[in-house]
Amino acid sequence: MVRICYDMSSCIVISKVVEMKDHADDTTARKAWMNLLSKAPDGQIAALLDASGPRPDFTWLRPPEIGSVMVRGRAGGTGAPFNLGEMTITRCALRLPCDTVGHGYVQGRRKADAEAAALVDALMQTDAAATIQAQVLSQIAEARATAQQTRAAKAAATKVEFFTMARGED
Amino acid sequence: MYVAVKGGERAIENAHAWLAEERRGDQTVPELSVAQIREQMTLAVNRVMAEGSLYDPDLAALAIKQARGDLIEAIFLIRAYRTTLPRFGTSQPIDTESMACDRRISATFKDLPGGQVLGPTFDYTHRLLDFKLAADSDVTEAPQRDAPDRRMPHVADFLNREGLIEEAPHDDTEPRDLTREPLEMPADRPLRLQSLARADEGFILSLAYSSQRGYGRNHAFVGELRIGQLAVEMDIPELGFSIEIGEITVTECESVNQFIGSKTEPPQFTRGYGLVLGQSERKAISMAVVDRAMRWEELGEDNVGAPVQDTEFVLYHADNIQATGFLEHIKLPHYVDFQSELELVRKLRREAGAEQVQEAAE
């Protein structure tokens, strides 16, 4: 079996650069890809990640664990918060040999997807970012956008068009 | 005399083996998969998620299969599973205005921004059995029309502009959680809403209906009903920022209620609120009507003694798992209890008999 070793020195260089870059920008970008990963359909992240190349070695900081999150709503949509009910999620954290830490958060009970999500999160912080962005994240975003558009178009087709009836007064 | 009885292990084992066989039914008929239940019995799955109080369509589908389609039994299984999960945290309150709507209607405003979007509804169907479904039938793709976005403003905002409807001012009070502490009275509105969101659909429906028929009437219109998907966001301490941890389907109903004013409030429209996990509009509308009725005290209305106004009665009897647990336990062996009752009745009859004999003698 062939394993590609990621160049650790480049990771270290990047981590130094990160410190100098605007922290807010990094947070926004990372938040965006984590938002996308948590909602990806079953098995999609793992399949795309594996198609993009061999997985790097890693050590678990927190092996995948399944738990719940209490979802809150607001009375009247905007008022006082209340507990609506829980949802299942799976989370994990891992470290690449270059010390980059990746966190995985996915909806449902999906340990393999959480692992893949954490790897994507970690790799996005290395010089593999461009590849992962193109071959994993953009694919997920595209599939999601298509599904959303289709659903929106079906909803739009059920929008009521009112006609004013002639009242026969003249 | 107290007699301890032991036994029944073999009978129980055999009963469960037969249960498994009966669950499978006629083995010449193909077995249902969990995915089939999830995809084709969606509204049953949604009800199990809402009342099981756990959003996970795969688990709800599995529970329905295991329970042979008995939804309360399935809800029981989900509630039991839920208690085994560690809770990672609490989400930020969901923003229902950000919902990508499948359906959004208003019974109070014909022309509203975004329009009346019917979505995949049973409304306006003729309720005639469709025998085509009994045969294998291909589905034709639903028509589509260009749509930039499924996000729509809330209907209540339009009335708000004239000041004719009560507002729901922003508030960040930490709500009580009935899954963490016993449900204790008096219950404030957030606790009532949590209880109603997981309450039995049939019970809430009947209470809402009783209110409509005059027992604590509050003249409800469906100001807005929307069903769609929205993201759930949670603060992640190890990251130092919040992320979306998933996407759920919810049903939201805002009722608009006639209100002539009271000692404390001016004449205006008031609101009731229903929010339910999954697609369940009957439940959401019922919840809004019941929520509004239980606000009588805060709005300075009279307590007319209607069941729906009795918060304690409603909340203590709305949970079908608590109800079925207590109700069904009476079928389990009560031999000793009953033996003592039997002794008591015999004794009373002996005494009554003795009195009659004495009266006759006198």
Image (cartoon, coloured by chain):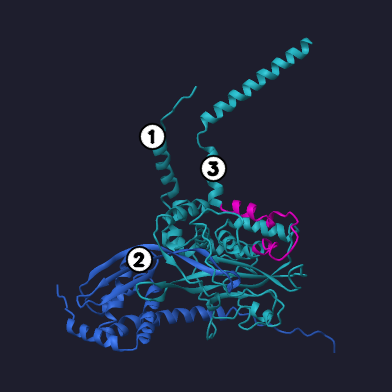
Question: Which residue is located at x 61 percent, y 75 percent?
Answer: B169
Indicate yes or no whether the magenta region holds residue B305.
Answer: yes
Q: Amino acid at mark 1?
A: Arg
- Find numbered disc 3 in the image and state the secondary structure of the residue it sits on: helix
Task: Give the drawing colour for chain A.
Answer: blue
Q: Amino acid at mark 2?
A: Arg
For mark 2, what is the residue? Answer: A110
Quarter where residue B234 is shown: bottom left
Chain letter of disc 2 in the image: A
Look at the image and tell me whether residue A127 can be seen. Answer: no
Image position of B163 (left or right of B60):
right
- Location of the C terminus of chain B (image quadrant): top right
Residue occupying the far top of the picture: B361
- Depth order, front residue of B236/A120: B236
- Depth order, front residue of B205/B137: B205
Q: Are marks 2 and 1 on the same chain?
A: no
Percent from the top left, x then y, of residue B218?
73, 64
Percent from the top left, x then y, of residue B51?
53, 58
Image position of A129 (left or right of B306):
left
For mark 1, what is the residue? Answer: B10
Residue B351's place in the image compared with A30, above or below, is above
- Find numbered disc 2 in the image and state the secondary structure of the residue it sits on: loop
Q: Are marks 3 and 2 in contact (CB under 8 Å)?
A: no
Task: Give the drawing colour for chain B.
Answer: cyan
Q: Which residues are magenta?
A: B291-319
Q: Nearer the viewer, mark 1 or mark 3?
A: 3
Residue occupying the far left of the picture: A1
Percent from the top left, x then y, of residue B106?
66, 75
Residue B84's place in the image compared with A146, above or below, is above
- Depth order, front residue of A117/B118: A117
Label 1 or label 3, whichever comes before in sequence order = 1
